[in-house]
Image (tube, coloured by chain):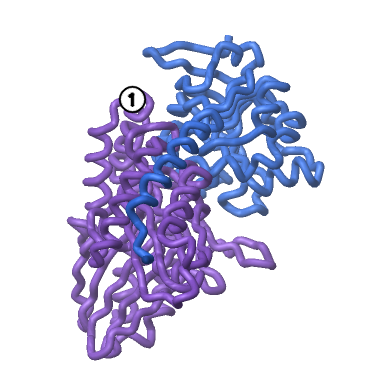
Amino acid sequence: MNQVEKMTDMIAKFIGHTAKKLPDDVIAKLEELRAKEDSPMAKVIYDTMFRNQELAVKLNRPSCQDTGVLQFWVKCGTKFPLIDDLEALLKEAVIKATFETPLRHNSVETFDEYNTGKNVGKGTPTVFWDIVPHSDKCEIYTYMAGGGCTLPGHAMVLMPGEGYEGVTKFVLDRMTTYGLNACPPLLVGVGVATSVETAALLSKKALMRPIGSHNPNERAAKMEKLLEDGINAIGIGPQGMGGKYTVMGVNIENTARHPSAIGVAVNVGCWSHRRGHIIFDKDLNCEVLSHSGVKF
Amino acid sequence: MSVEIRDGKKILVTPISAEDLKDIKIGDIVYLSGSLTTCRDVAHRRVVEEGREIPVDVRNNAILHAGPIIRPLENDKFEMVSVGPTTSMRMEKFEYDFVKITGVRVIVGKGGMKENTSNACKDFGCIHCVIPAGNAVVAAVCVEEIVKAEWRDLGMPETLWNCRVKEFGPLIVSIDAQGRNYFEEKKIEYNKRKDEQVAEISKQVGFIK
């Protein structure tokens, strides 16, 4: 087997694994939140969630039927030997995982409006590239962007006069309109930058950060905590049906901005936050950071 | 009688009548046994906008807003691998007419719906329930058999998968046959607390000075 085939196989297997088992940080957070809820309805919901995750592993099936459109955020070294093949092999890996796992067929060609039946299409899976100079490693975040938690996604450009108060309102408004239907407890990603696309990309990257991590900027970290506590205090709870905890966390990513604009975007991950994080070296030895106990 | 109590569980058994639903209230937890058909965006559009006859009889039965993962078996049979609800709100636009035309009694989905659906529930005797979403294996193991598959041209997620289910749930009633709407009532509380939180947080994020 050549190296391209080897990496394709490994990624396909890893994608399949992430469809069946949640990342360690998500499981730990859900256990914590489950213990803190005391209403009978919240308890029934959490009991169902944990029984489901057990059954998914036991029966070797995707834990949620919406296995999403696959998105990859790739931080690839310029010296990584398979850099030229990477985008094509990721697509091939998705097709392979779709039939082996199995995953749902979630690629509908736009305008022609037909489901390709392979879970890939024009521009899907999505690959976000970061090129890392002088490195021979390749770091990949995998993400299953499900329909339900993609719907609340929203970006806009605020006037500076609206300030971070405006950012607060923008995020919280989204929680009570769309967030409650997006399978809370949610992980909320917020991007603060200049324009819609810079903010939007940051809001997705924010969802790749581990739960419990903080923005290195002190004020941004403070705002993460304020938003987390504030959204929890709304009382949306698991499945939007009421409860003490609505979010697993709020992660903010930011860049500098144009003095005349505050670009802001929000992206959410559902409780079934199927994020994977894997790093390959030049010989395809790999380390999985998101999930313990993955074997290739 | 289409309502059974077993091991403390309230189980609706199809066919279900309007009478069977009259004592069920929002926030109740029930289960479903019998005929349940997956039915979502394009199927609703075909029935309501295109006026096509739905090829699975859902009258007095249940539909599920869902797009499952199916594994084909031999002899045109299928296995339900994973099935869970999708966002019901996408069907809101069509649901009043859909209930009127098809006579469906139980709609299962995810999240809330609005007036079109609550009016349909009240006018025609129907309920909307949510099954905790993302729990696709819990739901799939309640499917005893996929009886038939219609409108297959819509692809795996949108095909009408007609299932025989046993104690499918837990289903939390979000709209009852009196038209009360759990999510809409909750949203009033949520919005009030949201406004308070926006005001509170805004006092502490005046970073532009």
Tell me which residue sits at (43%, 27%) in the image.
B170
| A93 over A40 or under it: above or below | below
Residue A41 position by quadrant: top left
Task: For residue B192, say whether it is visible.
Answer: yes
Where does the image place residue A242, in percent across and percent down from the top left? 41, 32
Outermost residue on the front side: it is: B209
Where does the image place residue A274, in percent across and percent down from the top left? 35, 55
Where does the image place residue A101, in percent across and percent down from the top left? 39, 56
| A146 over A196 or under it: above or below | above
**Which chain is displayed in purple in the rendered image?**
A
- A292 vs B199, nearest the viewer: B199
Tell me which residue sits at (56%, 50%) in the image.
B157
Q: Is residue A13 left or right of residue A294?
A: right
Disc 1 marks a residue whose amino acid type is: Ser
| B84 over A74 or under it: above or below | above
Q: Is residue A25 left or right of residue B209?
A: left
Residue assigned mark 1: A39
The N terminus of chain A: image quadrant: bottom left
- B73 vs A242, nearest the viewer: A242
Q: Identify the subunit bearing mark 1.
A: A
- B119 vs A218, nearest the viewer: A218
- Shade representing chain B: blue
| B5 over A137 or under it: above or below | above
Q: Is residue B20 left or right of residue B130?
A: right
Residue B119 position by quadrant: top right
Task: For residue A238, say whether it is visible.
Answer: no
The C terminus of chain A: image quadrant: bottom left
Q: Is residue B55 left or right of residue A295?
A: right
Tell me which residue sits at (49%, 43%) in the image.
A176
